Amino acid sequence: MKIRNYWNLRDFGASIWENAGRPMRVAIVLISILLVGLLPFMGGSFLATPIASFDAVLVYPVGMFVLMSLGLNIVVGKSGMLDLGYVAFFAIGAYTMAILGTTTKLNTWEIMPIGIAFAMIAGVLLGIPTLRLRGDYLAIVTLGFGEIVRLVVLNSTWSKGPNGIANIPMPPHFGPLKFELENQRLFFWVVMAMILLTIWMIRRLTVRRPGRAWEAIRQDEDAAELMGVHTLKYKIWSFTLGAAVGGAAGVLYASKNLYIAPEMFTLNVSILILACVVFGGIGNIWGVIIGATILGYLPDRIRFISDARLLVFGLVLVIVMNFRPDGLLPRKKREKAIVKKGANA
Amino acid sequence: MRLEIKDLHVHYGKIEAIKGVSVVVNEGEIVTLIGANGAGKTTMLKTISGLRPVTSGQIIFDGKDISKVPAHERVDLGISQAPEGRGIFPGMTVLENLEMGKFHRKNRKAEMQEDLEKVYHLFPRLKERVSQAGGTLSGGEQQMLAIGRALMTRPKVLLLDEPSMGLAPQMIANIFRIITEINKTGVTILLVEQNAQQALQRAHRAYILETGNIVKEAKASDLLDDPAVREAYLGTGAH
């Protein structure tokens, strides 16, 4: 017997997906990609954002938030480590782009792997000593790390201190397609491609051994260790992959914004990205995407009420978390009994 | 596969939980470590399985000192622990929990079905519950799952941490019967218990642990008749 609960969007979506054959799945994916890809042309509809241009909002904050939330979700959602300093990796990516972009002839795509590598190295360096800690202690150390990175760039001459770095080059043309500030469609498509790549990576890893190991670590770290899971190694992997996504987002952000300064990389960003993850549903990539989209888009959509928008923003958070404490699209709750055929044999 | 612990000291911060304990577990034995709350029983097991670092002393297994080997590698050597409070993975199904026991085995695919059958044979209840989430099982079933999962690693020495904790008397008897059965298949067992009555009946030898020190070592059957032990651990209601 199949019960379809149309109000439970996650299970509804999952049931459509599981019942679909391969061609159907390919069609669903392609149509979704096409629809999302066409979003920048929706600027004239009710979706339009006052003040900021719609396609710019789609790139930042929406697209960037989605990308970073997906990265943070690997750390917080998959392996259950609370990281409050995620902005550090974003900052490392952004500063790599800013410094290399202004002092060398390398373009954005050449700097991208370097930025990702630096973020990953930072992830490993921070991870090896700190990932032996758990829960609140880890949260505090990562929070400290985020602040340290910001304070270092604020007080160093190579980063031009509080003045920040200006004249960061844009990405080079894609043939006839040009990156421009007035029309950020191309940026949006690049962010979208990066998001798709991240989703693909997470999905691949989740069904394999790293996914199993992360799941075990999240549920009971001691038991995971007793089963022969090298917990530290898998935790560092998870941390580093999250850092890589954050670094990639940072490189693109710097190259889009053309100017970065330390004040863009405060604790607020870490908290906001974490809010996106929690709001959407920790551990569920679709929930996280929806959460980040809403939290990125909403403040710009209601910008016409000026300062009151933050009040509305907070109110939405409180109301939604009251009605859906596990997020908009929570991950599957396995703690509840699942009756499958054959279980009562 | 003899497990020998020599002059073991373990600290939690500045507090010394294990103060120079020496224990020997010979191949094929059931050895029990009994003691009251806070005696250091769980700390002993966690140190042997590698979850707690050793301050000083040696853990010799199969002739080698393994006190510096990380926990996940001790599993490969053949030491497996069923953690206290049934540390199972609550969000994974029974089958997934059991499969986790094979996480680090090299030829896990070949061994999987065979070992699953062995576990189901010992615990038929687990087979009935294969696709149920671990967190939804009853206390006794969770204990079975914890032991079954430990067996999936093909241990030479099985460390059991208070398998009777919080269980109904009938379930306790059942679990202890299965422990004896596991031992007969050639698995050496180190059993930590507060339920001295059951533990002493099943074990070959016993150690009594008091605030981090071994105060007595004897054949289990001798301790059952020891008036001091009866007084301290078996209580007046013992039968």
Image: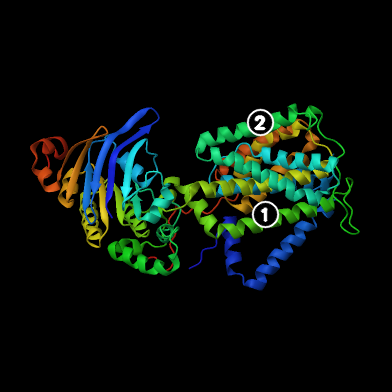
Q: Amino acid at mark 1?
A: Thr
User: Compared to A204, does A274 lie above or below?
Assistant: above
User: Compared to A185, does B35 lie above or below?
Assistant: above
**Which residue lies at the image location 89% right of the left edge and 59% below the top edge?**
A175
Counting from the top left corner in percent of width and height, residue A149 is at 68, 33
Horizontal relation, residue B115 to residue B39: left or right: right
Q: How is the image coloured?
A: rainbow
Q: Chain of mark 1?
A: A
Which residue is under mark 2? A148
**Which residue lies at the image location 35% right of the left edge and 28% below the top edge?**
B15
Counting from the top left corner in percent of width and height, residue B225 is at 8, 43
Horizontal relation, residue A283 to residue A29: left or right: left
User: Compared to A153, does A194 lie above or below?
Assistant: below
Q: Earlier in the sequence, mark 2 or mark 1?
A: 2
User: Compared to B95, does A296 lie above or below?
Assistant: above
* B230 vs B93, nearest the viewer: B230
* A125 vs B109, nearest the viewer: A125
- Where residue B132 is drawn, which disc sits there? none
